[in-house]
Structures are given as C-alpha cells and as structure tokens.
Amino acid sequence: MIEKNEQKKIAFYIGSLRKGGAERVFVNLADYFQKEGYRVLMVTQYQKEEEYDLPDGVERILSDIGEEKVSPSRVVNFFRRLNKLHVIWKEHKPDLVLSCIGKNNFMAVVTTMGTKTRAVVSVVGEAKEEYPSKGMRMLADFLFSRAAGVILQTERSRSFFCKKAGAKAVILPNSLNPVFIRPRYEGVREKRIVSVGRMDANKNHEMQLRAFAALKDKYPEYTLVIYGDGELRSHIEETAAALGIKERVELPGVVQDVAARIERASLFLLTSYSEGVSNALIEALALGLPVIATDVPSGGTEELMEDDVNGLIIPAGEQAALERAMDRLLGDPACADRLGREAARIQQKLAPERVNPLWKAYFEELMEK
C-alpha cells in the first residue's frame, strides 16, 4: 500500500462506462489501483444508461463539452473537446492517464502535451479496425511513438505499428473477473450451447444459428442460448424462425449472473470475425466449458487457446468448420470434458493477484522515469 504522502494519481480515459469488455477492464483496474492506495480519476466523454458502477472513492469527470457549447462546426467542437481534456489534466494533475479505443488514444496523447501527465495508450481490439485508414495508421504511429507507454494484448498486434511504436509496446493481459474464479462444475452438463456477446455483425451469431440448424436433427435435445443484445437482435430472431429452430433458440438479453447461467452448459461458442482478447472467451475457458472459437486476426484467440488442447480453434466465417467442431464435441463428451478441464487452468494464469501487479509495475516504471 502506498503511503498517503507518496500517493500517485492515475486517470483512466474512455468514451463511457457502458457494459462492454474494455469498460469492465477499466473499472476493474480502477478498483485495483484504488485499493492499492492510488488516487483514481475516471474521465469519460459521455454518461450512458446501463453502465458499470464505479468503486467508492473513484472520482468521475465528464469531458463532453455540453450542449450549450456545441457549435455547428465539427472542427470547432473537436478543438473545444481537446481543450476541455487539456484543462482536466492541468487541473487534476494525474501522474498518468491510461486511454483505450481508437481516437481516445489520440486525444490522450495530444491533450497531455504541455502537462506533467504521462499518456499511456492501449489497443484492446483489432488494431486494423481501430485504425482502418492509412491516415489513421500514420497518426497512430506518430502519436504512439510519443506516448509515455503503449499497451497491446497480443504479439501479433505489434507488427501493425511502425518499428518505433512497436518496440515501445508491452504486452499486458487483462485479469480474469473474480466472479469467474470458482471450482469447475463436474456434474452432468445441461443440453445447452451458449454464446455471450453483443448482437452485431462482427459477432456472427448467424453462423451459430445455421450450424445449429444443420445439426438440429442429430442432437434434438439441445438448445442454443445467446446472451446479449444489440442492433441485430431482430435479425437473429427472424433467421432462427426461417431455419425452423425458433423454439430451440433462446435470447435472454443482457443478464447480470452470466457465470451462473453458463457454467453447466455443454458447449460455448465464439464466432467473431475480429476481437482483441475476448473477455467472454476468457471467462468461458475459466469456467471449464468446452469451447469452440474463431481464429481472429489480432491473435487474441491463440493467446488464450491451443487447438485441441484447451478448446477447438476454427477459421473465422467458416460454417462448415463450426459444424464439424460442434458435431465432434457434442458427439464425444469425453473429448469435450478433456478440453474443458484443461481450459479451466486459465484461472491461475489470469488471476487478478497475478495480472494486476504487472500493470502496477509498468505504471510505476513510467511514473518514475
């Protein structure tokens, strides 16, 4: 624990605290550093509904310029947002600010210039999606090279950036949500195939539906349960009906007790086209579920899994591969159990008491420079 007269102040900068993977990581880190004796500031541009709660003692500030200051000019609004963030750092004087997700990283580096606050940028998703254009990639290379620190989640992501920015980057994993640290369920598994994630095009739930429909007659006792919500919910419902599996597909929406809901399932599916390192995948592995996951471009799946050791890895977007993998595990419970037992070992690898001190050591190193 840091003594009061030695307290450092850490700020986290993100768009909002809506319930998502990156947002949960930031809230968990804020909680950890608060308990370690740091003063913690959470800066978000917006405040939205259905957000994560902040731990007591963590101060929150909104960086949005407010409706009364919004100009018809997007350029003027951009510079007003830059100025407001700069003023926040000048007034609150954090020793370090951690940002994530796309343009937030640009904002953090630019607005800390001329202050004593050190900016640390992090890429939590697929780098090519966060910085899709040539111009954004060039700007990322320029600004990341001038940040105090760069955090990536996979080695494969390092090669996306220029040599200077890539060499500066460190690989830091996300810690496992403590809710998912529990003994593996060893009873008879429920005839349910589960998935957890936002209902958007990237998660490719439609492929799950089509693969499930292809196997529905061979495994008539099974249901497919997709937890989450999003803009494609209606499309998923319509697709399930068109495939004749509407009565065997459940869409409970966003739930609070995910671990309790999925820990007895027979199979977990992650079918995304792209991810960083998926928190949903980490949690499914930690529960010891038999898992099938797509090999995403960032290398996030390979950071967590070894094919046919603690799960099955399939090419993204290949329905036939998903059907074969599902058929294999549903038809061979012993194989599924072997993979699930090995998957649960990730609890030790990503336990908060092991991972969080790595973040602390890195932050301390940067603040002492």
Image (tube, rainbow, N blue to C red):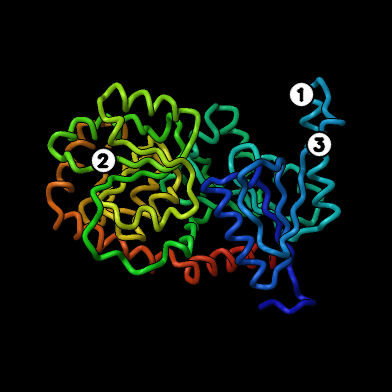
**Residue beneath the point at 25% across and 63% down:** 341
Q: Position of residue 76 (x, y in %)?
A: 82, 26
**Residue beneath the point at 56% across and 46% down:** 19
Q: Residue furthest front?
A: 247
Q: Find residue 62 and report its image quarter.
A: top right
The quadrant of the image that shows the C terminus is bottom right
Q: Earlier in the sequence, mark 1 or mark 3?
A: 3
**Element class at badge 1:** helix
Q: Which mark is residue 314?
A: 2
Q: CA distance from mark 1 to mark 2?
A: 43 Å
Label 2: how many residues lie within 10 Å, few (<14), some (14-19) or many (20+)? many
Q: Earlier in the sequence, mark 1 or mark 2?
A: 1
**Element class at badge 3:** loop
Q: CA distance from mark 1 to mark 3?
A: 12 Å
Q: Is residue 179 above or below residue 168?
A: below
Which residue has dot 1 on it? 74
**Residue beneath the point at 77% across and 31% down:** 78
